[in-house]
Image (cartoon, rainbow, N blue to C red):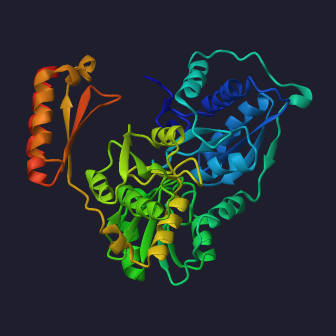
Amino acid sequence: MRKLFGTDGVRGIANKDLTPELAYRLGRAGAYVLFKDKNKDKTKVIIGKDTRISGDMLENAMSAGFLSMGVDVLSLGVVPTPAIAHLARELGADCGVMISASHNPVEYNGIKFFDNRGCKLRDEAESEIEKIVLQNDEIQYRAVNEKVGIIKRVENAIELYMEYLLKTTSHNFIGMKIAIDTANGSAYEVAPKLLKQLGAEVFVINDKPDGMNINLNCGSTHLEAIKKLVKETGSDIGISFDGDADRALAVDSKCQIIDGDYIMAICGMKLKKKKELNKDTIVATVMSNIGLDLAVRKENISVLKTKVGDRYVLEEMINNNYTLGGEQSGHIIFLKHNTTGDGLLTAIQLIDTIKEEGKTLEELASVMTSYPQVLVNASVKKENKTEYLRDKEIMEEIERIENSMSGKGRVLIRPSGTEPVVRVMLEGENQKDLEYLATKLAKLIESRLS
């Protein structure tokens, strides 16, 4: 179990868990691990951040770490996380760093590394960086004289990111009324500017960051705000971003939520029709709703499942050349365009589909029905978290439940990564039946493994 890096970088309360000292060491260790085999005098890293107050502190500390290793820093200012992935390639950077805690409250912050292809680092590289930092190993090298790194400001980072996004749609959005909630985060400037440039009438809320209000009762974790705006403005679609804009959720004109599963179904069907859905497959995670599987199956599209985390979705997509993947939470990857979840790209592709098909969003979303999900925790001994796989009685009960669902439901068991708990998730047609069966199965697991 890694102590620093989670599924999405290093994260913690800024200046308490994630201190400037730690950021400095991550910069030095990152430079050492990522660039030690490079045969060139100078390497460069791009660094961006979201709007939270601790961003400056952590950016400066981390930059000092890179500079001390002879790495030049291109400072992008406030940009969405997917801009880092794109601009790492566009600007020829050797590495990219985003300072953000995504959808978390303002007191948190985080550090995400990207490689020169714009992909999040592999587990092995993160583990090597973590080992150096935690063991407090002293890296012997320190750049001196002309080898010390320098900081350069990139004043047009947002414009470069917008240029790429504008090329991903063949339609203008004239006649569309679009409501957006930028969560007082990274999309506050670029999202309204981009959609207006495409011709849409745009209504925007939560676009005045003050360092303290990122994600505060707004954004993709608080959809009441965008529903209200859609209703008040009569918009055709509402888009809600999280703090670093690497994901987006939508609501239709009737304020019904269109989550990542719906977006993948809608866009996946369009891509297949255009012969751009490679291998007629969508890559999702085990948490995606079975409604996605059932909806796209009618169009002869398969859904391949990975473990939770968009990094694992991307890994599967790259390894097997798939073009569309993502998570229910709104991290959607269109690999033709970018190598990470991209909230603005997702919004554009969804609106592009509305224009292409000549249908409303609610009409497009009607292809899928989301099935009820019930989650119950079972407390077990820490050492027994995976023993359910070897317990005959538990496995027979799981098989019995799934057989009773006749292909329209499933059982998912996920051991917690941090607690002595096994999470029992049932999905199917009837909420009350699911609650009864999930509770019964959880009690069986507890009786056998606690």
> Nearest the camera: 108 or 44?
44
- Where 311 sits versus 159, above or below? above
Horizontal side of 241 relative to 262 (left or right) equals: right
Q: Position of residue 411 (x, y in %)?
A: 20, 40
Examine the rendering and report whether any part of residue 103 can be seen: no
- Where 42 sits versus 409, above or below? above
User: Quarter holding the C terminus?
Assistant: top left
- Where 417 sits versus 266, above or below? above
Horizontal side of 437 relative to 408 (left or right) equals: left
- Where 260 sits versus 47, above or below? below
Q: Position of residue 120 (x, y in %)?
A: 57, 39
Question: Outermost residue toward the bottom?
Answer: 175
User: Quarter holding the N terminus?
Assistant: top left
* Residue at 59% from the left image edge and 79% from the top image edge: 199
Q: Position of residue 391 (x, y in %)?
A: 16, 21
Q: Total label count? A: 0
